[in-house]
Amino acid sequence: MRFEKKYEAIVIGTSAGGLGTLQKILSKLPSDFALPILVVQHRLPAADQFLSIFLNDVCQLAVKEADNKEIIKPPMVYVAPSNYHLLVERTKTISLTVDPKVKYSRPSIDALFETAAEAYLSKLIGIILTGANNDGTAGLKKIKEHGGLTIAQNPQTAEVSIMPMSAIQANVVDKVLSLTEMAPFLNQISDEVKVYERRYHKLNMEHQSKI
């Protein structure tokens, strides 16, 4: 499969069962992965930075807690801090807020997905993984409305199936992938982005040489 457009970012949402699932996916991505990844994992308000530290230790790709006003760029995984919404500004920078909880959650998956959709439009990939409520379904709908690619984990491979099943039943999912299919698919997208960027750079250099 070849992709006709250059995706620019990936957003991932998960809750119950997310730690092991994120580890299995992110640990299989290379250190030069071509797109930034933003992650919301439902956690207790008082949770420390264990999630980002653990993932950084087991992944080739760098993982960190997101900082307010940080510029989003690859190769990096940005994890929402506990008790903060992780939003994406149209300038493709991070905004952390303590706005009211959405679906009893802060950080909220919907809040990340919906703001990222406004920033990246059709060049965004949204992924819903294992989880115990329907947070993320509305966000995937927004991504799909803007022409982005929406993915849900196959509920049969999810530790808790409610979250991906909600998105699938709402008809807002373009692709359903098993846990073992997720990383190879993302690596394929990354490789296509690298090819796209090399071609763009070559064409740009040829154009400059003719000026």
Image: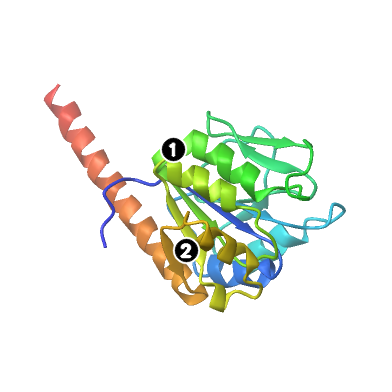
* Residue occupying the point 19% across, 27% down: 208
Quarter holding the C terminus is top left
Question: Does residue 85 appear anywhere in the picture?
Answer: yes
In the image, taking residue 152 as reference, residue 51 lies left or right, namely right
Mark 1 burial class by Cα count in 10 Å: few <14, some 14-19, many 20+: many
x and y, in percent, of residue 186 in the image: 43, 62
The residue singled out by tag 2 in the image is 30
User: Are discs 1 and 2 less than 8 Å apart at CB?
Assistant: no
Quarter location, residue 122? top left
Helix, strand or loop at mark 1: helix
The residue singled out by tag 1 in the image is 121
Q: Amino acid at mark 2?
A: Pro
Which residue is at the far right? 46
Vertical relation: 165 (above or below) 200:
below
x and y, in percent, of residue 126 in the image: 50, 52
Vertical relation: 80 (above or below) 166:
above
* Residue occupying the point 52% across, 56% down: 170
Q: Earlier in the sequence, mark 1 or mark 2?
A: 2
Which residue is at the far top? 211
In the image, taking residue 27 as reference, residue 14 lies left or right, namely right
For marks 1 and 2, give the one nearer the viewer.
Answer: 1
